[in-house]
Amino acid sequence: MARNLAWLYGAEGLAKVLAIYSFGSLGRLLLRERMGDLEFSLHALFVLSLVLDAGLAPYGVARASRDPGLTRSLAGRIVGLRAGLVLVCIPILALVAFSRGGDSVARQLVLWQGLVLVPGVFLLNWVFESRGEMPVVAVTNLVRQAVLALGVTVFVGGPEDVLLVPMLDGGGFALGVAIQVWFFRRRVGALDLWHRRRDLALILRESAPLSLAALAWALRLFLPGLVLGYRASSEAMGLYGPAHRLLMALHTFVWLYFVNLLPAMARRLAAQDEPGHRRLVEGSLRLVGWTVAAGVVGGWFAAPWLIVAVYGANYAAAALPLRLMILVLGLAFLAGHANWGLIAAQRRGDQLVASLTGAVLAVGGCVALGAEIAPASAALVLVAAEAGALFCATALFVRRVHTLAIWSCLLAPTAVAGGVAWFVQRTSWTPLVGGLASAAVLIVLGWVWERGLRLKPGASR
């Protein structure tokens, strides 16, 4: 288990570094307008990749974990279903390309993302996750990002080369998927694509709730960017997209944290050990509360330096959207305790309601802004949607499962973070110094506070 986690964390961390390098380089090589066209096409790609998955990956993990003997036949059926779904996704991609407008290069950027969609038909992450073979999963994204980074370095020299980006990304993804198929053939058997057509409708129906939850999450996080791409200029999207990319790079670690916390939560809830679950979650909340306080306050002050360091001085105006997206990341970390707690308690319907609440708020915010939407206001919609999902998930967990001292766990980190932010705001420190200093102070104060609580007479251990 520890070896698998080390592979996953190490490879995912390296893949994120390579991705930041690739898109930071593209930010410097492309004009903001062309960078906006690229980011819009990637927003569309991400949402359609979830349509292509249709909840089949988590469904496959659950089924194959319960009955490993089904893995080969299930893989053939899932690949077959995705082959049909990709025939739906490609026309939607074309519709997005031609309905947005823009010049021919902007349209082609969206269309060429089909090269990235097609290899996803054969993506077999779920097989290796169910078998505990995380190194294979880890290598796939690492290979993809390595090919993209190398290709950007060698072949992309300016805005005229922007159409090479989806080709390089698609090639790297196809290579990673080919490695998975090779491992599948060696360890499980050949993919059976022609004789496994039974129960396809049943599989799609059973995976539908998982697909709906994933799409609601994607709507919450990607709709503001898509609307901005439609309603505003490509240059505006070029300011929003890079900040959003940094958010999504860091958002992966929210998922990694709660994937590892989930088994412990599920065991305690299954055993009806309410006190044990409460201690686990409230302890995690205190840890995450201080970590989020340090990250949000430090990130808020460091954002002007960070966006320029990654993308160049041409993107300095993206500092405010990045600051707001750092708030989104903090809210996502806090919301994870209730969201994943509902999953651990087998309350997927309630978790879907919370996710849909955030999606509805995102839609409402975009409608309210209309043609006035801008990079900062689109990021503010993200904050409102994530906050709504947090409050809804927390209320549902407390009502359906059991009470948690969520807000009391967060009171001290929030109050201290406000005081530190107030002080740093009144200094003349540079963004980097202010960010590092505020984060360091909050980490130290959090350690002192929690140590004091543990040493307090009568404190639970």
Image (cartoon, grey):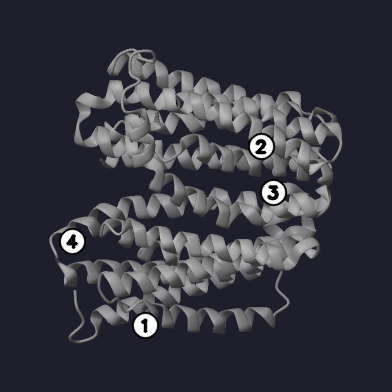
What is the C-alpha distance between the residues marked 1 and 4? 22 Å
Q: Residues within 10 Å of mark 1 (few under 14, many from 20)?
A: few
Q: Which residue is mark 4?
A: 268
Q: Which residue is mark 1?
A: 408
Q: Which callout, 2 or 1, points to the residue nearer the camera?
A: 1
Question: Which amino acid, by three-letter code, is at mark 4?
Answer: Arg
Q: Which residue is mark 2?
A: 22
What is the C-alpha distance between the residues marked 4 and 3? 43 Å
Labelled disc at residue 231: none
**Relative to residue 335, is residue 8 depicted above or below?**
above
Q: Residues within 10 Å of mark 2 (few under 14, many from 20)?
A: many
Question: Which amino acid, by three-letter code, is at mark 1?
Answer: Ser
- The answer to whether the residue labelled 4 contacts the one labelled 3, judged by CB atoms less than 8 Å apart, is no
Towards the viewer: 230 or 244:
230
Q: Residues within 10 Å of mark 3 (few under 14, many from 20)?
A: some
Q: Earlier in the sequence, mark 4 or mark 2?
A: 2
The reply, left or right, for residue 56 in relation to residue 64 is right
